[in-house]
Image (spheres, helix red, strand yellow):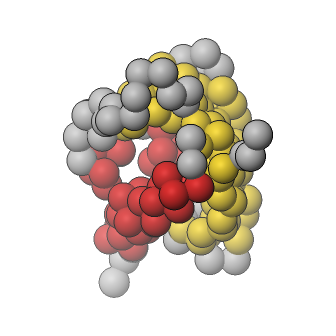
Amino acid sequence: MAEFGFKTTYVVYAAPDLVFDALTDSGLITQWGGGFSVVEDRVGGHFEYFDGWIRGEVTHYAPGKELGFTWKPEEWDKRTKPSRVLLRLMPHAAGTDIVIDHSDFPSQEEADKHNGGWIDQILDPLNDFFIGQMPG
C-alpha cells in the first residue's frame, strides 16, 4: 500500500522556544491563527486547532525541539484514519527551521492540498505574527 504524505522545511523568524510556544499555547494560537485551540503538554494529550476543524492526539512533546500529533480534519470520513504530523524545530540564522513531516494521508491529492494549507493557514500567519512583534 502506498504511503501518501509530504516533507517540507520552512523558516520562521523567531527562536525555536518561541515558535514552539506559539504552536502549543492556546492564547498565542488564537493570536496568529484565530479560533479555539488546545495542545495538551504531554504525549497522549488532546490536540485541536481552528475551532475543532482539526483534532488528534499529541504523539511527541519536546519543548523547543519537537511536536507531533495525529491530524484529522472534521470533513474526513469517520472510517478514515488520522494522518500523522511531526514538526522538528532547529535553530537557523534567521530564527527557526521547521521541518514538517506529514504522513498517512488517504491520498496524494489530500497530502498536496495539506502541503499548501500548512503554508497558507499555519506557517505564513505564524511568521506574520512574529514579524509584527519585531521592533522598528
- Front residue of 123/115: it is 115
Q: Quadrant of the C terminus?
A: bottom left
Residue sitting farthest toward the right: 1
Point out the image quarter for the N terminus.
Answer: top right
Say which residue appears at 66% left-offset and 67% top-offset. Answer: 9
Please tell me whether residue 9 is drawn above or below residue 68 in the rendered image.
below
**Residue plotted at (58% across, 43% down):** 105
In depth, the one of 34 and 19 nearer the eye is 34
Image location (x, y in percent) of residue 119: 46, 66
Is 109 on the left-hand or right-hand side of 104?
left
Residue ID at (72%, 63%): 91
Identify the residue at image location x=24%, y=47%: 34
Q: Position of residue 15 (x, y in %)?
A: 60, 60
Asked if residue 85 shows in the view, the reply is: no
- Relative height, residue 30 to residue 47 (above, below): below
Residue 25: which quarter of the image? top left
Q: Position of residue 64 (x, y in %)?
A: 66, 45
